[in-house]
Image: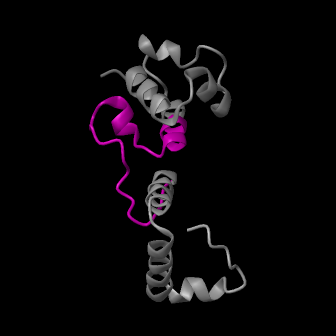
Amino acid sequence: MTTFTRIKKLCNERKISINELENALGYSKNTLYRLKTQTPGADKLQKIADYFNTSTDYLLGRTNNPHLDNDDEITDDDFRKIERFARNLTPNNRKKALRILEATFDDAFSKDEDDDDDDL
């Protein structure tokens, strides 16, 4: 898989076009399409990798794992998974899950006691 193909795949997963990515990164039109025949510079490659929270090794085809091994960082995908999970719970199970979270992470919840947002 080429660098361009990997970037296109990441764009598709995020539901954005190559042109939207170019705009987000401040690149001129067709900059990324040139990657079909050219090797990107390190600075451009790093900017793309940072945008997708992936490694330059993945973009270059040195690994097939698009995920960075950063256990400390919670990604947008992690939050989307939690949200999908919560949406599928019954109201009773949502309350149970919230109680479990509050008991497990009491230090985090004690900081937000004024926030009675039951969106879970």
Residue pictured at 67% horizontal, 73% vertical: 117
Give above or below for 97 relative to 54: below
Residue range in magenta is 46-75
User: What scheme was used to colour the molecule?
Assistant: one colour
Predominant secondary structure in magenta?
loop
| Quadrant in which residue 20 is drawn | top right
So how many labels did they put on this image?
0
Front-most of residues 3 and 67:
67
Front-most of residues 106 and 10:
106
The outermost residue toward the right is 114
Residue pictured at 67% horizontal, 27% vertical: 23
Image quarter (top left, top right, bottom left or bottom right) of the N terminus: top left
Check if residue 61 falls in the magenta segment. yes
- Where's residue 42, x and y in %? 48, 33
Give above or below for 79 relative to 45: below
Front-most of residues 102 and 39:
102
